[in-house]
Amino acid sequence: MFSAMFDSDPAIETHDLTKRFGAFTAVDGLDLSVDVGTVVALLGPNGAGKTTTVRILGTLTRPDGGWARVAGHDVVSEADLVRRAISLTGQFAALDKNLTARENIILMARLRGRSARAARSVADELIERFEVGDFRDRLVKNLSGGERRRVDLAASLIDRPQLLVLDEPTTGLDPRSRQVVWSTIRELVADGVTLLLTTQYLEEADALADRIVLIDHGREIAAGTPAQLKARVGEQRVDVVAADGAAFERLTATLAPLFAITELREQRTVRVAAPDEVADLARVVDAVQRAQIQIDEIALRQPTLDDAFLALTGKPLAGDPHHAAEEALA
Amino acid sequence: MSTSIPTVPDPGFGGPVRFGGPVRFGGPVRFGGPVRFARDTLLLTARHLRAIPRVPERLLDVTIQPVVFILLFLYVFGSAIHVPGIHYKDYLFPGIIGQSLAFGTIGAGVATSNDITEGVIDRFRSMPVNRLSIITAQMLGQFCEALLGMAIVVVFGLILGWTPHLTAGHAILLGALVLLAMLAFTWAGVLFGMLVRSPDAMQGIGFIVVFPLSFMAGTFVQISGMAAIPRTIADWDPIAALVASVRGLTEGFRSSGSWQLDHPEVAMALWCLALIAICVPLALRRFNRTLAG
């Protein structure tokens, strides 16, 4: 009772949280702490236990071991208080597809205790704020993924939640919609909303979170600020993208004797370690030009969280290298 | 290589707590107990009712099949079927009504499974909404849809010239039994809808279980003319009780040969009450436990 009134409680606190499905352990002794007013990204590949963790925090799944508290309330014994404190949006925008965008928000507002009139006015405010106006009266089933997400986010903020949980908020969105969702999330964060988001996108965790918790097989692999994680992985590098397969072979042959390189064959990219940063970039450009190799792109890059994951776990993050590359380029 | 880096407490956070914040709308009213249950149930049922005119194909799902069967058996196969003591049209329509009641299970199951796989149920479950009302509304919404579907089928029958011979007492008894059956079969559908993996799986179960049972129930031909095995199944087929009751009450036509057929109204009521007694607690239990993992 009193705990919710004091500021000392973390927004989320879990200890030794465990959830098994038969022989499969989805969450394996996870200790998590999210301070009020921060943005924490739970980053991990598919099947790492992100969604299960979120479902436990949202009172949708009971843990098998350990405990979890949201805004000071136990997710099992005080589930109803947790539900008042939290706003959870699932992996797929969970709206009634046969209602319009506006009707969905009104319904959620009424379920949160508003009168019909108050619900309408809240809905209209949120519609304006999230720029849902253009499609407010269209049925959700006819909206694009990005539009649904915005309606979803608007509906999540009816009662300014103490904790907002977004499960993979941009999965399946095109890059433009992703940008829109990101800027919406940034606005919320600027407002002081405490946010836990899960993502498979390194870029997303990097762009949005104050703190990143890398998880795999239901366990924490590493945690820290994006900068800390990146620092751990070390130096910058130059990525050179060859124009075609033949150019890639020549590029490899040209650069291998001169630099420490990594071949990313599927992306036709040669990654060159660049401890001297811009000076190394200049040397790489020079070598490529002299050999007259056709390239699509050359760039000096900060190490990404993809590299961090590889460095910390010994295996690449998401199984799909194309996707990781796409993210790095976004 | 070291496999972990220390978790550093964030220096810059844990700052001013702003649970309130600048965006503040009129505070929500808190409801408790039965008031909250009733309110949430109404709100959530309304969402199903709104979908009815917007997704007419769903209503078509529950009406097209009976309509096709009516046309097929009345005008294609009907001339080959002879039931002594009753005009075939009057034999057929009560059968269709009984079958439609059972098909309500499939409709409710598919809709429930749909809502679960789409995540909208989980959204409600993660909100401060009375949990019992979520599932009650699920049932009520399907119940209303089944009622509307039934009305359409009956009207279609009347247009084609079916003339039920109902006394006032029989009409009341029939209405009560039909509503009870809808309640029971809708609950069964909600339960199955929560147990299956997908709406398609629900359709599959409907096709494999409900469909054959509805054909062996004396719906289109007399049970007494069937081979031994289907006849034995029909003796225990709840749909046979539905069909026989509707036929008995509307047409005064009674079959015999099993306890069910000798006491169809009692059998129908017992089947429905048993179904409710089994399905409601199981559905509530399933709902309160993990859904979809």
Image (cartoon, coloured by chain):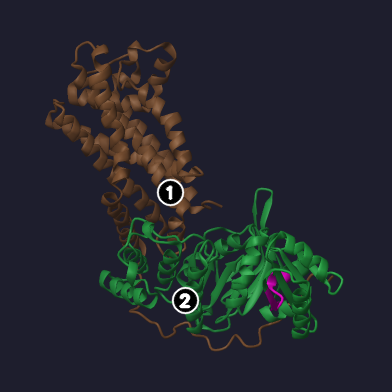
Chain colours: A green, B brown
The residue carrying mark 2 is: A184
Whether residue A225 is visible, yes or no, is no
Query: Which chain contains the residue that carries disc 2?
Result: A
Q: Is A51 colored magenta in this rendering?
A: no
Could you classify mark 1 by the number of other residues whose Cα lies within 10 Å: few (under 14), some (14-19), or many (20 or more)?
many
Looking at this view, is A326 or B244 the one in front?
Answer: A326
Q: Which residues are magenta?
A: A298-307
Residue B271 is situated, as x and y percent measured from the top left of the image, at 36, 31
Residue at (47%, 81%) from the top-left corner? A187
> Do badges 2 and 1 share one subunit?
no
Relative to A314, say whether B74 is above or below: above
Whether residue A261 is visible, yes or no, is yes
Q: Is A299 colored magenta in this rendering?
A: yes
| Residue A243 found in image quarter | bottom right
Relative to B166, say whether A131 is above or below: below
Residue A308 is situated, as x and y percent measured from the top left of the image, at 73, 71
Residue at (34%, 38%) from the top-left corner? B104
The residue carrying mark 1 is: B114
Residue A193 is situated, as x and y percent measured from the top left of the image, at 50, 79
Q: Secondary structure at mark 2?
A: helix
